[in-house]
Amino acid sequence: MQEYLRPTEIIDWKHPEVEQLAKELASGLDDPVEITGKCFEWVRDEIYHSHDHCMNPITLKASEVLAAGTGYCYAKSHLLAALLRANDIPAGFCYQRLSRDDNGEPFCLHGLNAVYLPGIGWLRIDARGNKKSIDTKYNPPEESLAYEIKVKGEADLPEIWADPLPVIVEVLTKYDNYEEVWENLPDIPLIRSRS
């Protein structure tokens, strides 16, 4: 589990402001399930989704997301992982491959988190941010994700990564406004099993 707890350049939970917020959110709580809920709801509701709210700058590191108050789903997952790891709760990254228009190609990745909770195990949580068509909740052990897999080519990628995928980091580093990111959302090809 140590790889899901460590600070990194992107999941910089030892940054003073990130660590302070993590402790504030956990104040008076001992149960990792409750602490996770507080962290999840704060990121979901207090950090604005860059495209939904037409906001810059483009953020990558947890500390940047917190300072700017905005981020794409990927960046929001980086901040949530940092807050959880700062509270000694293992957190990783999951992705869904989704159709951009519900009709197939083009596809893009959607970023969310997995958290390891006592008595539950790994649970996917999606702090993307709610809007008219999306209503995610924190309701362990049930998952409440922003998107369902609906069309051929979409997929719930089963892995739980300790670090963000390089293709995510590349896009959030290369482009500097929310429209450019939206036009170049990252994707990865699905690997077909040989059966």
Image (cartoon, helix red, strand yellow):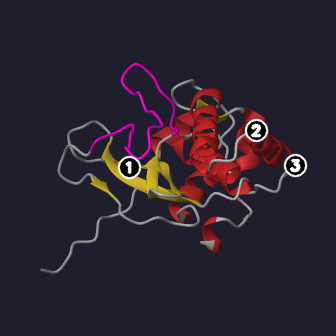
Q: Nearer the viewer, mark 3 or mark 1?
A: 3
Prevailing secondary structure of the magenta residues: loop
Range of residues picked out in magenta: 127-148
Q: Residue 135 at what x, y percent from top left?
A: 41, 27
Query: In the rendered image, which quarter is residue 192 located in?
Result: bottom left
Q: Nearer the viewer, mark 1 or mark 2?
A: 2
Task: List the residue tagged with mark 1.
Answer: 108
Counting residues from the N terminus, which is met first, the one under dot 3 or under dot 1? 3
Q: Residue 29 at what x, y percent from top left?
A: 70, 41
Q: Which amino acid, by three-letter code, is at mark 3?
A: Pro
Q: Residue at x 17, y 51 (%)?
A: 152
Counting residues from the N terminus, which is met first, the one under dot 3 or under dot 2? 3
- Disc 3 from disc 1: Cα separation: 33 Å
Toward the left, the furthest residue is 195
Is there any visible trace of residue 186 in the rendered image?
no
Q: Is 80 drawn above or below residue 177 in the view shown?
A: below
Q: Residue 14 at what x, y percent from top left?
A: 82, 57
Q: Residue at x 24, y 37 (%)?
A: 102
Task: List the residue tagged with mark 2.
Answer: 28
From the viewer's side, name the closer residue of 28 and 69.
Answer: 28
SS assignment at label 1: strand
Query: In the rendered image, which quarter is residue 48 located in?
Result: top right
Counting residues from the N terminus, which is met first, the one under dot 1 or under dot 2? 2
Q: Which amino acid, by three-letter code, is at mark 1?
A: Cys
Task: List the residue tagged with mark 3.
Answer: 16
SS assignment at label 2: loop
